[in-house]
Image (cartoon, rainbow, N blue to C red):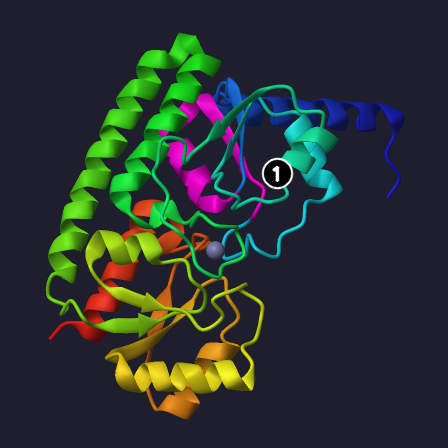
Amino acid sequence: MRLTSAFRHALALALSATLFATLALLPPAAAAAEVRVVASFSILADMARQVGGEHVEVTSLIGTDSDAHSYSPSPGDVRTLSRADLVVFNGLNFEGWMERLLKTSDYQGRKVVATEGIEPLKHAGHDHGGADPHAWQDMERAKTYVANIRDALVKADGDNAAAYRANADDYLARLDEADADIRQRLEAIADDTAVITGHASFGYFAQGYGLRFLAPQGLATSAAPSAARMAELIEVIETQNVRALFYENMTSPNTIDQLAEESGLPIAGTLYADALASEGEAASYIGMMRHNARVLHRALAN
Ligand SMILES: [Zn+2]
């Protein structure tokens, strides 16, 4: 079919009029977020979104269900950082690559070390140095994270200070509520009960909620234990009231599978350790803590 030039012109006009009408029906685009926040991993990203609300645009360098231990920054991460207004990271040597990445990105903006002011636990045999960095695993300490993020946002964007304070108050209240629920749930588990997880990231959870966690690797999330270490673990299982094994969402399941086979212990579920889930309940920090408590309770309560 051949269209005359006049007809084509009319058609184009009609199409653009339709397009214009369609656009006019769309809701107005949300106002651009005032503060571009980059968080090192998904748990911090969720906290920053909870406190920042509509005023922030948050990017997480390490994705959901991904392992911070084996992460290495990409050129895209350098670009993301160079455009950021605020960088949030855990500290306590959790992100061993961060200082170098900040330098490479020539980042001159504000930084928040989320664990600032937290008294760290010692961490034996993990690959983050002497202090245990996994402080978010205790919700009481997580409140310090939230306060640090709130204070940094207030400094970075004073115009919205009232909103950040109100969001933080609301979020802190929800943390308290979840913390109390978790505490109550885990009271039903006897104090000397021990469990084994993929890597040693539950020290604060153990201290905060009164459970014993043992970890096969002790070291990194990726290292496979030697035959001698495996024999030691079987010995530990037989003498230390170890009742169940758990996968971690971002750690290879191989060691836990092997341990289950050799010890006959059940694998009682997946715990969220160093990363959120991409969807479902554990896609938020509060959700992941509630999930972990429920999985532990189901496996271990008398
Ligand atoms: Zn870890």
Residue drawn 34% across and 56% down?
203
Q: Which residues are magenta?
A: 41-62
**Camera-nearest residue between 217 and 51:** 217
Question: Looking at the image, is 26 positioned above or below residue 222?
Answer: above
Quarter of the image for residue 241 reads bottom left
Q: Is residue 63 magenta?
A: no
Q: Position of residue 106 (x, y in %)?
A: 72, 25
> What predominant SS class does the magenta segment belong to?
helix
Question: Looking at the image, is 254 positioned above or below residue 72?
Answer: below
Quarter of the image for residue 193 reads bottom left
Q: Is residue 42 magenta?
A: yes
Q: Amino acid type of disc 1?
A: Met
Q: Is residue 141 left or right of residue 14?
A: left
Residue drawn 36% across and 86% down?
235
Work out which quarter of the rendered image holds the N terminus and state it: top right
Residue 271: in sight, yes or no? yes
Exactly how many numbered labels are in the figure? 1
Q: Is residue 68 left or right of residue 285?
A: right
Residue drawn 72% across and 22% down?
13
Mark 1 burial class by Cα count in 10 Å: few <14, some 14-19, many 20+ = some
Residue under label 1: 98
Residue 266: in sight, yes or no? no
Q: Is residue 243 left or right of residue 7?
A: left
Work out which quarter of the rendered image holds the C terminus and state it: bottom left
Q: Position of residue 141 (x, y in %)?
A: 30, 40
**Camera-nearest residue between 36 and 111:** 111
Q: Secondary structure at mark 1?
A: helix
**Camera-nearest residue between 86 and 226:** 226
